[in-house]
Image (cartoon, grey):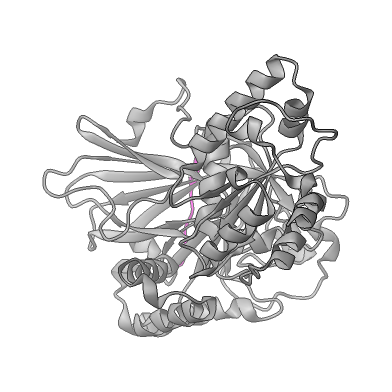
Amino acid sequence: MVGDRGKLKEFYIPNYILVGGAMPKIKFAPACPVIVFVNTRSGGQLGGELLLTYRALLNEHQVFDLGETAPEKVLHKLYVALETLKGSGDVLAADIQKRLRIIAAGGDGTAGWLLSVVSDLKLPNPPPIATMPLGTGNNVHFAFGWGKKNPGTDRQSVQYFLNQVKTAKEMQIDSWHIIMRMRTRKEGSCDPIAPLELPHSLHAFHQEGFQTFRGGFWNYFSMGMDAQISYDFHAQRKLHAEKFNNQLINQSTYFKLGCTQGWFFASLMHPSSRNIAHLTKIKIMKRQGHWEELHISPSIRSIVCLNLPSFSGGLDPWGKPNRKKLRYRDLTPPYVDDGLLEIVGFRDAWHGLALLAPKGHGTRLAQAHGVRFEFCKGAVDHTFMRIDGEPWKQPLPVDNDTVVVEISHFGQVSMLATPSKRSKSISDPVSPATSHDDDDDSSNEEEYPEDSGERKKFGASDTFKIPDRIDIARFS
């Protein structure tokens, strides 16, 4: 144990910083101090096993179970201690704050939760985040080179992962703010329908006569077919957690739900009233303050607003448009830090399977700096939505009212990426455009041209506040 502890001094944070007490005689600062958050509800039994391994290899006070401890309280307490010690001339505390990195062990929802917390706290020198894949899809993890498969929980596997964290490079990614506002119903509730609650990074605010939901996402917002399958999966897992203790079992359950819900034969088994064009009017922001309607095919049953090139188990719905299409449609290569969302549509589950082909992709609808969905009274009373792997069932207007969901760019956060990352930065010397050939894409989907525009900053989740210049009343 002593030998192992000695090897991991480069990740170790001493007790006096974490829980107080006298400063020990330490000859050197850790090269890569880490705070570890483990979602023990992810990955079946793997989360609990990982928690024990991390606590055996590191200071047990720098490893936290997300089922027992709120990450915002941990980071707030830690940064108060670091700032206080720095103020008293503690050089070690200053070094640890400068080099600190966060490990988030869980699925996509866990990754979004930690990104939301770091953004909300507005920490001085906010730490970058590495993601350890414990979920079913692990899309965020795959986008930054951390893999899709659940990891080993033994000491050797964890030490290997820690060494990857130490050598990983920081990468800025866009943050996206989402706000939804509606009048309070005369009958019934506007809250998400049980058994699932709001995602961790989305928060409800109840005001007289109105209900507002706002928060943030970093990977994607989706609505329709894919979100409904995800909702049913999460609802079943919440009710029967003991049946979802293996990644392969979870993935097969996902596929079965897609079959039993009829999404492979959507045109026959699902009413057209559930198609996106029937549910909502979509507008996109081409330049600051200017919105244009986005016309989509009535056959589209799922729409994804994508920030990272990883969705549904690491697949890339946008793909790689060739140079001719980039020029013809005035598109840009998809970067994770360019202030643009890629908007993609799908007709049915067969269309989704096209992503498995070498050049497969969904229907490329647009690139935009902002997206607005306007729902009015229609043939259905709810729809399914999802942000960063966390779905919910959202009631829609039943009277003459409009529900508006608006997505806009808000700043950036820092992720840790390995050399095998799929995500590309606009500042990378090698961009995705250099790898695009002039061959035709494999899909003949209808597509709609879209211009680039200026960015709009809007606000974000929980402790963020909407700027005074934004008139929230226009969402009513």
Side of 83 relative to 208 (left or right) = right
- Residue 220, how many percent across, how many down? 54, 55
- Residue 255, how many percent across, how many down? 46, 81
Which is nearer the eye, 274 or 64?
64
For the question of whether residue 342 can be seen, the reply is: no
Q: Residue at x 32, y 51 (%)?
A: 375
Image height of 35 relative to 350, above or below? above
Split into 4 quadrants, where in the image is the C terminus?
top left
Which is nearer the eye, 157 or 460?
157
Which is nearer the eye, 212 or 283?
212
For the question of whether residue 6 can be seen, the reply is: yes
Based on the picture, tell me whether residue 309 belongs to the magenta stretch.
no
> In this picture, which residue range is highlighted in magenta?
291-297
Split into 4 quadrants, where in the image is the N terminus?
bottom right
Side of 25 relative to 317 (left or right) = right
- Residue 409, how many percent across, how many down? 57, 39
Q: Residue furthest top?
A: 88
Q: Residue at x 59, y 57 (%)?
A: 105
Which is nearer the eye, 269 or 229?
229
Image height of 381 relative to 289, above or below? below
Q: Residue furthest right?
A: 429
Based on the picture, tell me whether residue 295 belongs to the magenta stretch.
yes
Residue 22 lies in quadrant: top right
- Residue 175, how many percent across, how many down? 59, 42
Q: Residue at x 72, y 53 (%)?
A: 332
Q: Residue at x 12, y 43 (%)?
A: 186
Image height of 18 relative to 115, above or below? above
